[in-house]
Every structure is written in C-alpha cells, then in structure tokens.
Image (tube, helix red, strand yellow):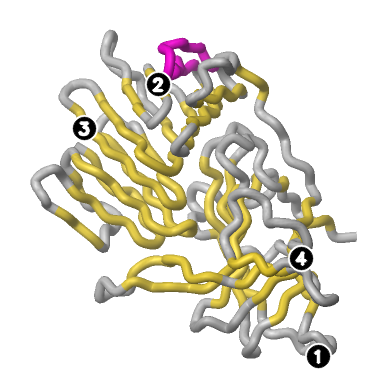
Amino acid sequence: MAQVESVEGAVSWSDDTGGQRTGLSSGARLAAGTLNVEGASSSAQLRFDDGTVLTLTGDAELGFSDDGQKRLALRRGAFTGRVAHQPAGRPMVVRTNTAEIEVLGTVFALASEQNQTTLNVESGNVRMRRLADGRSVEVSANRVAVASLDVGAAMETRLQGVPPEEWRCSFNQPPPAGSNGLWLPPSAGKRGRMRSLPFVAGHDANGRMVVHHGVTVRAMPGEDSGLVTLTERSMLHVRFRTEQRTGLKLFLSCEGPGGTFGGNFELAIQPSAELPDTGGWMRVDVPLRPLHVLSPEEHPSVEGERVRTLILHSYEYDAGLEVAEIGIGQEK
C-alpha cells in the first residue's frame, strides 16, 4: 500500500503478526504496519499509492493502514504530511496520545509528545480534536494549534513564529528542554558544560547499530518557531574540548517556514591547528556555507530554513567531547 522513498539512519517496519523488516532502502514496498525511525539524525519518507507523502524525522513511530480510508497512529515523534485529495467522506485520520486530526488534502506537520500534540499547517485546513474533552478547532494555513491533557486550556490557533537569525546556548545554567547530554554544572571555578552521550546514528551494511557520541539541542514540539533561521551568512560558534584530538561533525535537522520538514544537513569540522587554553578549551567559528545537503533533490539549500535539531558529535569513537557554549550567528 506504500513505498519507501528515502531513508537516512535506522528505520524498520513491523506488523501485527510479528513480521519485521530492517535495513529498509528506497523502493521497498510495505503493507499496513508500523514504521519505526530510531535516532535524532534518522528520517524516512513514505509514499502512498495515491501520491500522499509522509516524512518521519528523528525518533518516531507511526502505525498506518488503508482500507479505503487512511488511518495513522503517531505514537511518538514527528512527521510532515503532503496529503493528496482524499475521497469524499473518507478523510485521512491521524491519532496521537492527546489528539485526533482529519485531513482531506493539505500540507502539515504533526509532533506528538506524551502530554501534548502540536499541529503546524502550511496549506489547506486541518481539523484537530482534543481527546481529553472532545473540543476541536479548524487550523488554517500558517497557523499552529496544540492539544494537551489540560482541558482548561483554550482550543485555539496562533500564527507560526519566526526564530531569530542569531542564537546562542551556554551551559552555565541547566540545559534547555530537549537537550541530550550529561550536564556538568559550574563548580570550583569551572564552567558549566555538556558531556557527550551515545546516540543511534544508523545501521551498517550488516545490520549492526552505528553509535556516535554527541551533544544535542532541539526545539521542543510546542516551540513552533525552531531555534534559529539560517542565512547565507550563518556561522557556527562553539567552545569545546575533547580528551583526544579529532574531527567533529555538526548535524542540523531543519524545517521550512510552514513548519514542515526542511531537510537534514551536515558539516565536517576538521581538527583545529590552534592550541587549547590551559583548561583544554578551544573555540571554533565556522561558516555554514559548505554544509553538506543530505537530500539535495528536495532541499537543495539551507537559506531560510529553521533549525529544529542540532547535534555536535564525534563519529569514529567517543572522544570525550564536552561543550561549554554553542550557537549560530551571522558572519560580520
């Protein structure tokens, strides 16, 4: 009933009878079941026979079926939908922990947490119903709605936000929600920092899990504007140290102005020729112009994209990476 269009990282499929497929690749045909995307840097694109395209990003789990009416269950994570016009009286229905939405044909993004669901609509109209009390709202183009467990909150829409072109994160304070790493608070004159933790980056040709070690900062699903807007003059600023001299990689997962998936991008950061200070800290300022586009056909440029997830990581081994400050600014 559907075909895998593209895969990045660790993606698998299973059904209710115990059938399972791992190592999915472009062109694979799938029956009704569950698509599982594992790891913040992973993604998968699924095309239904009517032309509807779903793009799952990051850690996500989506159940899907079609008996003449598409029914989806987003159990965790986020996806973007570009939905072909559905038959009269048979809208595509998506259910999460806290909401149910009905789609006739539109472009939208949906993100599900345990206690709330966030809907961004790029074009068309989508009806969103809060499961806790049955209240609903029509969400039109360029607007956002949230359905949570709080029945006292109004079911209403708001305009999508626009993140700034400069953003910086210091770890002297507790890390922002959505971060991943071991926070080491400032003490005895030492600056606060985040220590890298392992994360799933994919599977190799033999099906073995590929693990990298990094620090992750992400905008939470309810924060619809993302972290920062990229331009042709965007630069990465990072203060870090490692136990072993090594190159690092920057991974960015982005969304477009309408809140839908905007592509994944990577940048290799070569070992610096500079000597670290007495505490072992180094500062790197790198233009983002040479970002490697992982999906060039669909997302050829980062300009105007909004960073949703940022990961700085070592990729051959655990280099003992610690990050004291990271940000994206503008080249002077």
Q: Secondary structure beneath disc 2?
A: strand
Badge 4 or badge 1: first in the primary sequence: 1
Q: How many marks?
A: 4
Q: Position of residue 279 (x, y in %)?
A: 80, 85
Q: Position of residue 232 (x, y in %)?
A: 75, 54
Residue 144: image quadrant is top right
Q: Residue at x 45, y 23 (%)?
A: 106
In the picture, measured across the screen, residue 91 lies left or right of residue 1, that is right
Q: Quadrant of the N terminus?
A: top left
Q: Which residue is mark 2?
A: 101
Q: Which residue is mark 1?
A: 275
Q: Secondary structure beneath disc 3?
A: strand
Q: Which residue is mark 4?
A: 325
Q: Nearer the viewer, mark 4 or mark 1?
A: 4
Q: Nearer the viewer, residue 40 or 205?
A: 40
Badge 1 or badge 3: first in the primary sequence: 3
Q: Amino acid at mark 3?
A: Ser
Q: Nearer the viewer, residue 17 or 6?
A: 17
Q: Residues within 10 Å of mark 4 (few under 14, many from 20)?
A: some
Q: Secondary structure beneath disc 4?
A: strand
Q: Which residue is mark 3?
A: 65
Look at the image and give the residue range highlighted in magenta: 125-139
Q: Examine the rendered structure and indicate whether residue 205 appears above or below residue 220.
A: below
Taking the magenta stretch, the answer to whether it contains residue 136 is yes
- Quote the CA–CA distance across marks 3 and 4: 45 Å
Q: Residue at x 60, y 40 (%)?
A: 256
Q: Secondary structure beneath disc 1?
A: loop
- Quote the CA–CA distance across marks 4 and 2: 39 Å
Residue 271: image quadrant is bottom right
**Disc ID at residue 155:** none
Q: Residue at x 50, y 59 (%)?
A: 294
